[in-house]
């Protein structure tokens, strides 16, 4: 026998009393039934179910059976059985009560129906075809392709805006969404489907609207709301080239609203930060970005001058005797730049310590080998780092360890 799929006729049913017919707990039981075994879970077959199994680009439903969490729902097409993977818990065959995670189900209904409406809109406007569809955690991707023989050369940003607006007009029209079932592909293909149906069993076709107002007609096994108005909203976030197609990243329904709310909050904060109204925000941000770029340039030039000045201060001290010096305001990268300015003149060792980062830059002409000094000694004081014979850095968690390292190097080379 096959599992009766109650979700097909009663998509809004949130709870159901059913009979648990089979329960697999062990690896051997799963193997004998041709199912995948997973530790700390069990597989259940019911006589009927409200849980949609994974399929058609739509994830499975979740919820509980007798209060036990349903974590996966899969269909065996060869037997018609729907398998429910549950967390391991005491459970026996017999009457059970099923409760659907309605928020997850309705999110999927909004997203899947939104995909239909948007795909149908592209097809009606330009003949652009949906070649792939994936429903993720709060988002949908659709791979759109221009068919051979079309006069179109690309899908432009203006086309995306037009399609998004037209798709939402279909949402506002609150068109009926009806699923019809057919016994043969010939009968199903006699409907105005945008994709030819090439299978012969279990054929279901979703109609979004009727007659001239129909926005989509396509074979689909998923769950959908009763009308397009329940989609709420359709948003195209961006498009990116993918294997010769354009992959659309979209949000529908509740997730589209949450995305809009988040962006509205961010925009409000930016307007406050830039003391601007929304219409002037981009201009204000561009002006500030230019000021920031100029300030960074001035800072860069100032740092270069300071590094050059410090190199000049160190130059008279260079020789066979090691040089040790501490800096309060220079970063390790600043000190590395100073070392680079002196690299052609180094014969001995210089150790330059950044007190703000507890980091020591070591530089020499190659003797003593800086990297070896760090590798052999930094770990003694909980430090780490490394480098080449001519340049290395040692990084410490506090100033005391850094100073002990400097003292050790000074005594080692004395």
Image (tube, rainbow, N blue to C red):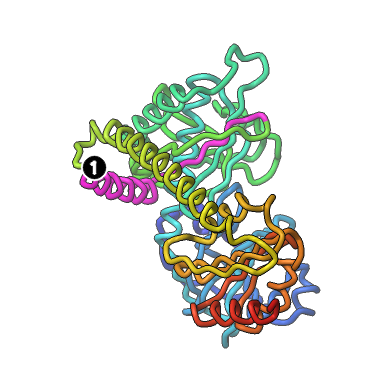
Indicate left or right for 371 with 300 as reference. Answer: right
Residue 321 pos. (x, y %)? 66, 69
Residue under the point 31% across and 34% down: 172
Residue under the point 36% across and 48% down: 259
Residue 166 pos. (x, y %)? 38, 27
Residue under the point 58% across and 15% down: 152
Indicate left or right for 300 with 183 as reference. Answer: left
Q: Quadrant of residue 387?
A: bottom right
Magenta-colored span: 244-273
**Can residue 79 be seen here?**
no
Rendered view: 297 above or below 79: above
Residue under the point 49% across and 60% down: 331
Q: Quadrant of residue 243?
A: top right
Rendered view: 141 above or below 47: above
Residue with the most extreme top position: 151
157 vs 333, nearest the viewer: 333
318 vs 308, nearest the viewer: 318
Judged by its main secondary structure, the magenta piece is helix
Q: From the image, which quarter does the N terminus lie in?
A: bottom right
Residue 111, magenta (yes or no): no
Q: Pointer 1: what residue?
A: 274
Residue 249, magenta (yes or no): yes
**Can residue 166 be seen here?**
yes
Q: From the image, which quarter does the C terminus lie in?
A: bottom right
Question: Crowding near pointer 1: few (<14 within 10 Å), some, many (20+)?
Answer: some
Residue 117 pos. (x, y %)? 45, 34
Residue with the most extreme front position: 316
156 vs 72, nearest the viewer: 156
């Amino acid at each position: 026998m096959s599992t009766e799929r109650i979700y097909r006729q009663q998509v809004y049913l949130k709870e159901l009393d059913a009979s648990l017919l089979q329960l697999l707990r062990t690896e051997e039981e799963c193997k004998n039934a041709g199912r995948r075994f997973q530790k700390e879970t069990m597989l259940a077959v019911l006589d009927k179910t409200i849980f949609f199994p994974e399929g058609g680009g739509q994830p499975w439903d979740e919820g509980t059976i007798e209060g036990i969490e349903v974590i996966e729902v899969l269909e065996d097409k060869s037997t018609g059985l729907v398998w429910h993977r549950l967390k391991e818990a005491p459970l026996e065959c017999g009457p059970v009560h099923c409760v659907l995670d309605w928020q997850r189900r309705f999110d999927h209904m909004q997203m899947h129906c939104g995909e239909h409406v948007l795909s149908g809109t592209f097809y009606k406007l330009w003949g652009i075809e949906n070649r792939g569809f994936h429903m993720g955690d709060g988002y949908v991707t659709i791979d759109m392709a221009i068919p051979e023989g079309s006069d179109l050369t690309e899908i432009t940003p203006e086309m995306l805006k037009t399609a998004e607006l037209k798709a939402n007009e279909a949402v506002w029209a609150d068109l009926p969404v009806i699923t019809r079932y057919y016994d043969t592909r010939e009968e199903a293909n006699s409907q105005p489907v945008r994709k030819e149906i090439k299978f012969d069993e279990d054929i279901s076709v979703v109609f979004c609207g009727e007659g001239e107002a129909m926005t989509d007609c396509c074979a689909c096994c998923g769950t959908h709301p009763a009308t397009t108005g329940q989609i709420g909203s359709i948003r195209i976030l961006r498009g990116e080239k993918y294997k010769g197609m354009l992959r659309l990243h979209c949000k529908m329904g509740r997730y589209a609203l949450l995305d809009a709310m988040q962006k509205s909050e961010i925009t409000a904060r930016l307007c406050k930060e830039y003391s601007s109204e929304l219409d002037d925000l981009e201009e204000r941000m561009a002006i500030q970005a230019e000021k920031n770029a100029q300030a960074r340039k001035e800072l860069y030039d100032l740092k270069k001058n300071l590094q050059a000045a410090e190199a000049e201060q160190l130059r008279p001290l260079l020789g066979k005797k090691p040089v040790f010096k501490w800096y309060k305001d220079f970063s390790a990268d600043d000190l590395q730049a100073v070392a680079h300015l002196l690299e052609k003149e180094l014969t001995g060792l210089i150790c330059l310590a950044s007190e703000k980062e507890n980091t020591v830059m070591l530089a020499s002409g190659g003797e003593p080998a800086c990297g070896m000094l760090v590798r052999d000694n930094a770990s003694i004081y909980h430090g780490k780092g490394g480098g080449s014979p001519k340049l290395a850095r040692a990084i410490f968690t506090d100033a005391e360890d850094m100073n002990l390292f400097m003292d050790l190097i000074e005594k080692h080379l004395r």
